[in-house]
């Protein structure tokens, strides 16, 4: 039973809510963990801040440009520990 004074839901409400939830999940499971990994590798604070701003602004574009660079710098014998080693300089 619908109350007379209750506002009528917008037909776009479900789409907006889904878009918002998807963005929160992407932030929580994608961008923030990637930035934490990146911040643990980089030494300079200005690089960390610039990367954070680019990740939040451009998202997957930034990540897809950073990862091949890091993969290229990994040696053949680095293994999994190479992923978590801090960059030198």
Image (cartoon, helix red, strand yellow):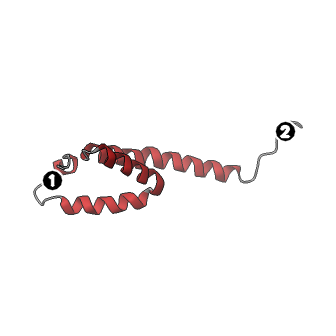
Looking at the image, residue 29 sits to the left or right of residue 1; the answer is left
- The residue under the point 82% across, 41% down is 7
How busy is the neighbourhood of tag 1: few (under 14 within 10 Å), some, or many (20 plus)? few
Badge count: 2
Q: Nearer the viewer, mark 2 or mark 1?
A: 1
Using the numbered discs, state the Cα–Cα distance from disc 2 to disc 1 in whole angstroms: 61 Å
Q: Position of residue 62 (x, y in %)?
A: 39, 58
Disc on res. 79: 1
Residues at circles 2 and 1 in contact by the CB criterion of under 8 Å = no
Disc on res. 13: none
Quick one: which residue is furthest to the right in this view?
4
- Give whichever of 56, 13 is nearer the camera: 56
Q: Circle 2 sits in a helix, a strand or a loop, which is it?
A: loop
How busy is the neighbourhood of tag 2: few (under 14 within 10 Å), some, or many (20 plus)? few
Quick one: which residue is furthest to the front in this view?
46
- The residue under the point 21% across, 63% down is 72
Looking at the image, residue 3 sits to the left or right of residue 46; the answer is right
Disc on res. 2: 2
Quadrant including the N terminus: top right
Look at the picture and state if 28 lies above or below 58.
above
Looking at the image, residue 89 sits to the left or right of residue 6; the answer is left
Q: Position of residue 42 (x, y in %)?
A: 26, 47
Q: Circle 1 sits in a helix, a strand or a loop, which is it?
A: loop
- Sequence-earlier tag: 2 or 1: 2
Looking at the image, residue 1 sits to the left or right of residue 10; the answer is right
- The residue under the point 41% across, 61% down is 61
Q: Position of residue 65 (x, y in %)?
A: 34, 62
């Amino acid at each position: 039973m619908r109350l007379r004074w209750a506002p009528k839901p917008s037909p776009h409400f479900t789409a907006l809510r889904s878009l918002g939830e998807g963005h929160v999940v992407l932030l929580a499971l994608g961008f923030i963990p990637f930035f934490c990994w990146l911040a643990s590798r980089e030494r300079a604070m200005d690089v960390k801040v610039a990367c954070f701003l680019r990740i939040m602004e451009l998202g997957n574009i930034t990540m897809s440009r950073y990862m091949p660079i890091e993969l290229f710098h990994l040696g053949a014998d680095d293994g999994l520990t190479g992923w978590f080693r801090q960059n030198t300089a």
